[in-house]
Image (cartoon, rainbow, N blue to C red):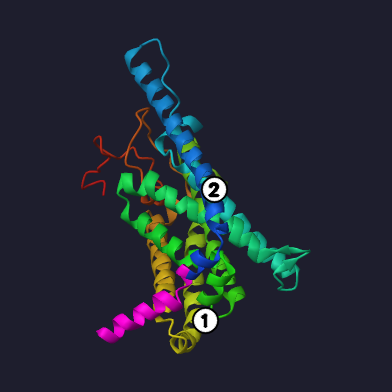
């Protein structure tokens, strides 16, 4: 036991990528993180403001017979039912676009990280990662903790913890055992999975606004399921063909804690992706291809979760003020 404690102390003081990134990063990542955090706070406040306006309109319609109730399929009503969708959609679209864009530019540059004088690694460190980590932390405070969504909270913690050291050369070099380009590539590859989240948010929009079946609905559904299935395949590939072959290197350099966290992160995100993929397919193939109009109420529902989005729920099956569902609904 003493040997394990001594080993941990040595790792924490001399070869800790997280501490290295913080100490040697000159506050660059942290400064960008603060900027983007304020931006996400504004998006969350905007979503809550729209929610309050919608609630007031619903209340007015209930008390005044001459007042028309708000359209439950309007964009305002949808945002009011899920105030965090603005921040979540921006994050998924922005990070997916940046990650995919960097990989495309790198390919065009002949697998070089320098694209016409633009350092693609710096773009990821100063734009892509700060945007994402600021979102995950803000979403934990504005959504996960208030809604007690443990699954999404665990996802956010894993993402922040595993990707933070990539935010600076010194941390990424230590995390990648001297190969910052490989570990940065690994980080960017993982974030291409946000493409599926962007499509899933669009699927949610279609489920709550379409009046009749549309061929595009089936196409979007297939893209979403394929995206989450692709996540499982990609994280499995990264784990087996990229991380596992370097096991002996991490052992030789006494980076067992770092290695364990990397393995845990990829296994964790892969399992969560598999879970969401299964949730989306529970309704059968017909539900993926054929749109069925939902019955919606003008009353704003509470307790909306990521799993509801995956299932395609609009919250109308939820009961009570705290949004708890009956056993049948579950």
Give the camera-side residue of 218 and 88: 88
Mark 2 → mark 1, Cα distance in angstroms = 34 Å
For the point 38% across and 26% down, which residue is it? 55
Q: Nearer the viewer, residue 244 or 21?
A: 21
Magenta span of residues = 1-19
Q: Is residue 221 visible?
A: no
Q: Secondary structure at mark 2?
A: helix
**Spot occupied by residue 68 in the image (x, y as percentages of width and height):** 43, 16
**Residue 36, disc:** 2
- Other-residue count near label 2 (Cα within 10 Å), few / some / many at <14 / 14–19 / ≥20: many
Determine the residue located farthest toward the top in the rendered image: 66
Residue receiving disc 1: 241
6 inside magenta stretch: yes
In the picture shown, does residue 115 fall above or below 50?
Answer: below
Query: Closer to the camera: disc 2 or disc 1?
Result: 2
185 displayed left or right of 271: right
**In this view, 40 is above or below 77:** below
Q: Quadrant of residue 63?
A: top left
């Amino acid at each position: 036991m003493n040997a394990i404690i001594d080993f941990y102390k040595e790792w924490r003081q001399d070869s800790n990528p997280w501490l290295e990134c913080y100490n040697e990063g000159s506050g660059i990542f942290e400064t960008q993180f603060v900027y983007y955090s304020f931006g996400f706070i504004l998006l969350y406040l905007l979503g809550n403001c729209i929610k309050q306006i919608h609630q007031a309109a619903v209340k007015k319609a209930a008390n005044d017979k001459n007042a028309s109730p708000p359209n439950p399929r309007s964009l305002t009503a949808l945002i009011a039912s899920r105030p965090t969708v603005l921040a979540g959609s921006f994050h998924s679209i922005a990070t997916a676009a940046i990650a995919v864009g960097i990989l495309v530019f790198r390919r065009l540059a002949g697998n070089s990280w320098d694209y016409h004088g633009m350092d693609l690694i710096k773009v990821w460190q100063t734009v892509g990662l700060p945007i994402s980590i600021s979102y995950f932390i803000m979403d934990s405070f504005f959504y996960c903790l208030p809604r007690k969504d443990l699954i999404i909270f665990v996802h956010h913690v894993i993402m922040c913890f595993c990707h933070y050291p990539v935010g600076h050369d010194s941390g990424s070099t230590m995390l990648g055992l001297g190969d910052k380009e490989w570990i940065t590539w690994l980080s960017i590859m993982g974030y291409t999975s946000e493409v599926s989240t962007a499509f899933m948010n669009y699927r949610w929009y279609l489920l709550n606004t379409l009046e009749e079946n549309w061929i595009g609905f089936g196409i979007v559904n297939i893209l979403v399921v394929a995206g989450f299935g692709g996540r499982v395949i990609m994280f499995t590939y990264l784990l087996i063909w990229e991380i596992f072959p370097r096991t002996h290197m991490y052992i030789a350099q006494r980076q067992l804690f770092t290695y364990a966290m990397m393995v845990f992160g990829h296994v964790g995100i892969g399992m969560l992706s598999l879970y969401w993929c299964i949730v989306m397919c529970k309704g059968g193939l017909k539900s993926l291809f054929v749109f069925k109009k939902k019955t919606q109420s003008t009353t704003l529902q509470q307790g909306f979760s990521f799993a509801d989005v995956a299932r395609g729920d609009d919250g109308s099956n939820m009961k009570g003020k705290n949004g708890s569902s009956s056993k049948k609904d579950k």
